[in-house]
Image (spheres, rainbow, N blue to C red):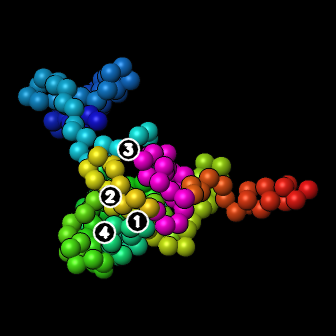
């Protein structure tokens, strides 16, 4: 990932710099201006070692402070969201997570050795409906996450319940251990079941 910043106050100068920056973005990537010289700085990809591909915009259903279920066999039962990694943010707005996001959380209920410890987890289910590209709206009956390491590898060996397709595409190591990956919506499932009966 790359960042670019501008240090101009006049509007027309800023517009010229923005158009120049857009041209640079199309050719090579993002740039940052430091003391009049444009230097290329690459951000460290901390905490997303196992993530692949790009993520589409989804409804954010889990703000900071939300209690969610832990869907693996690490011994944790309930997790509380502390922070959301890679969240841009805005003044006085609570960071929120959605399916496929990596979060910092604390164990509220579970084994004594896990309680009150800060852990990293990936959201695999949420109750708030989100819209897919085909126009369908999908939601689950609970909010759930699995505990992972910095490299995106699961600490547990079993996942209880299904995993959303969006999470499976971003985190293939999680999808490989999932009992089911939700690909279709209810209408498609009914249609396919009627087709099989015929």
Please give the residue where the numbered disc 3 appears in the rendered image: 51
Tell me which numbered mark, 2 or 1, is placed earlier along the sequence. Answer: 1
Q: Residue at x 45, y 70 (%)?
A: 143
Q: Identify the mark nearer the N-term, 2 or 4.
A: 4
Q: Earlier in the sequence, mark 3 or mark 1?
A: 3
Say which residue label 1 marks. Answer: 72
**Quadrant where the C terminus is found in the figure:** bottom right
Query: In the image, which disc is placed on residue 81?
Result: 4
Looking at the image, can residue 157 be seen?
yes
Where does the magenta region start and end? Answer: 159-179
Q: State the CA–CA distance, disc 1 to disc 4.
A: 17 Å
C-alpha gap between disc 3 and disc 1 = 19 Å
Q: Give the residue furthest to the top.
A: 27
Q: Secondary structure at mark 1?
A: loop
Q: Which mark is residue 155?
A: 2
Q: Residues within 10 Å of mark 3 (few under 14, many from 20)?
A: many
Q: Toward which corner of the image does residue 137 lie, by quadrant? A: bottom right
Sequence-wise, the earlier of marks 3 and 2 is: 3
Marks 4 and 1: in contact by CB < 8 Å?
no
Q: Residue at x 25, y 63 (%)?
A: 119
**Label 4 SS:** strand
Q: Is residue 150 magenta?
A: no
Q: Are marks 2 and 1 in contact (CB under 8 Å)?
A: yes
């Amino acid at each position: 990932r790359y960042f670019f910043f501008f240090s101009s106050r006049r509007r027309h100068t800023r517009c010229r710099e923005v158009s120049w920056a857009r041209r640079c973005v199309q050719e090579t990537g993002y740039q940052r201006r430091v003391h009049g010289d444009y230097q290329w700085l690459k951000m460290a990809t901390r905490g997303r070692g196992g993530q692949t591909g790009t993520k589409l915009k989804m409804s954010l259903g889990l703000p900071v402070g939300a209690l969610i279920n832990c869907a693996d066999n690490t011994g944790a039962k309930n997790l509380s969201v502390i922070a959301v990694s890679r969240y841009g943010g805005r003044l006085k707005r609570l960071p929120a997570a959605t399916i496929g996001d990596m979060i910092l959380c604390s164990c509220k209920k579970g084994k004594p050795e896990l309680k009150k410890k800060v852990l990293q987890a990936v959201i695999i289910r949420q109750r708030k409906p989100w819209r897919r590209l085909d126009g369908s709206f999908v939601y689950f009956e609970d909010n759930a996450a699995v505990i992972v390491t910095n490299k995106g590898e699961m600490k547990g060996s079993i996942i209880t319940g299904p995993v959303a397709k969006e999470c499976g595409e971003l985190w293939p190591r999680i999808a490989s251990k999932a009992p089911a990956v939700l690909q279709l919506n209810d209408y498609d499932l009914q249609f396919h079941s009627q087709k099989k009966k015929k």
